[in-house]
Amino acid sequence: MAGQGHLQIDSVSKAFRVNGAPLNVLDSVDLSVAPGEFLTIVGASGCGKSTLLRLIAGLDTEFAGNVVLDGKRVIEPSLDRGLVFQEPRLFPWLTVAQNVALGLLNAGLSKAQKSRSVAEHIALVGLTGFQDAYPHLLSGGMAQRAAIARGLVNRPGVLLLDEPFGSLDALTRARLQDELQRIWAAEGITMLLVTHDVEEAVYLGDRVVVMAPGPGRIAATFDVPQPRPRDRANPALARLQDRVMAALVSTTSEQSPAPHAASRPALAARAFLPEQGFRPI
Amino acid sequence: MTRHLRGAVLPMLLLATWEAASRAHLVDPRLVPSPELVAYTAFDQVVHEGLLRNLAASLLRDVAGFTLGSSLGVMIGTVLGLSRIADRLFMPSFNGLRQIAILAWIPLISIWFGEGEAAKVVFIMAAALIPVVLNTHEGMCGASAKLVDVARTLTFTRWQLVTKLYLPSALPSIATGVHLALIYAWVASIGSEYFMTVGPGIGGLIIAGRERFQMDLVILGILILGLVGFLINRGASAVEARLLRWRDT
């Protein structure tokens, strides 16, 4: 089932209709993600980064341009693309193992293969011993681990992560970032992680894409050449964080030209506001 | 355990008051027979008059009407909850129809379904149907859009969406409806015996007691109704707790 994981995004634009008027949320986004690459996208609230992820996932198919994975155009959700949301979104009436097994519901494996794969992925995210627990018994971090296992269990070519650690406490977040890095190295799949946390984006990414809002577009791209495993205290990483942060701040300054948003000043102003948790290093 | 004992305090107190009032001749024994007489009548009815057959007749009717009504109710509620067109088409009429007191249907049901058992079961079915349709519908509409997104990324088929997402997430609501249906069906079972043709059943027993001015029989019937209702409620709560153990309560 595991594909190459080569993702190609060609001049993707997307508009929502707000009170009958079109509001551009994405404006000709071009992006190429190499197989096995860990790409992080960082941007202020309203830059369309989550929308972009939904388009890649195939949840929203009304857009201009093309999303192509391993030569195939994305027209609907597929098990080739796993998606992890900000909240764990586990089915509360199913145990951890049953929730993870949902990822294999339509995978066409035998029962034995499925249960082996589920057990493997529960072990991979460090939840062995909790497979029969119901979600309400899990901590936020454990629930998110289960959600990651559900996204990975089918061995997708690409795993899309939409601010997966955004609602966790700092300690759990740091631990899960390390876990995710380990899983990425072990599974060798392409990962695309959206975040508003610059530190997280630089620490995890092979490449960091900075998106600007109003309408959402790519403002800058940074390579992160540091070898792994990385050290959070590495001064080179810190310097890069400063540069990414500077690029990010410049996307939200008032002078930033936004021809499409100019006609809707009130909405645009709200979209420019940085999110909470947006910290100046 | 002490919780159950506390619940028994009030009935015991009532029983003691009843006994004391009878002993002291504070009440007319023709209107309020003594507990002993009721107990004797119960014994006599079980041994000589086939009380258990009457009870079985009522319960059978109850179970038949309840089963038909609640399963039909889950089906109708599911369709109304999942199909926007069906919802728009039928929900207003259904909401209008249910405003009509269930007892008002008895003359029509009697005429359409005859004097016998079928009419009674149809009446009980209608009583059980309404709460199940409403609660199932509500549960279906309350399914989380966020979980629907998860299901879509996992490429659920339409059938999997219904069986793996909508039905389980509506289950607490459906359980509430079915629980109500159990109570309504039992009330309707007795109602059907009161207002439709007389036949075997606890309702029939009470009617017979009234006609023969045997208050001991009437009181016995009422006690049985209460006891059965109490047990049904208990059983339903236990099943509900088991089915919904995943809930964070």
Image (tube, coloured by chain):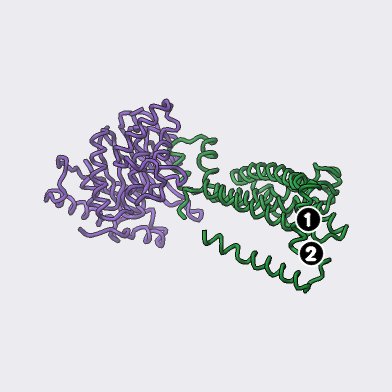
Q: Secondary structure at mark 2?
A: loop
Compare residues A258 and B132 and report the one nearer the observer. Answer: B132
In the rendered structure, which amino acid carries the disc numbered 2? Pro
Q: Read off the residue under disc 2.
A: B33
In the rendered image of this protein, which colour is used for chain A? purple
Q: Residue furthest right?
A: B212
x and y, in percent, of residue A130 in the image: 35, 43
Residue B28: assigned label: none
Lower position in the chain sequence, tag 2 or tag 1: 2
In the rendered structure, which amino acid carries the disc numbered 1? Thr
B242 with respect to A157 (left or right): right
Q: Residue at x 40, y 27 (%)?
A: A112
Dot 1: within a 10 Å radius of its alpha carbon, few (fewer than 14), some, or many (20 or more) residues? some
Q: Secondary structure at mark 1?
A: helix
Residue B41: assigned label: 1
A211 with respect to A265 (left or right): left
Q: Quadrant of the N terminus of chain A?
A: top left
x and y, in percent, of residue B59 in the image: 72, 46
x and y, in percent, of residue B113 in the image: 83, 43
Compare residues A27 and B77 and report the one nearer the observer. Answer: B77
Dot 2: within a 10 Å radius of its alpha carbon, few (fewer than 14), some, or many (20 or more) residues? some
- Whether the residues at callouts 2 and 1 have beta carbons within 8 Å, the answer is yes
Q: Is residue A32 visible?
A: no
Compare residues A160 and B222 and report the one nearer the observer. Answer: B222
Chain letter for the residue marked with disc 2 in the picture: B
Chain letter for the residue marked with disc 1 in the picture: B
Compare residues B27 and A103 and report the one nearer the observer. Answer: B27
Task: Provide the letter of the chain coloured green.
Answer: B
Q: Residue at x 75, y 70 (%)?
A: B23
Q: Cα distance, mark 2 to mark 1?
A: 11 Å
x and y, in percent, of residue A160 in the image: 34, 41
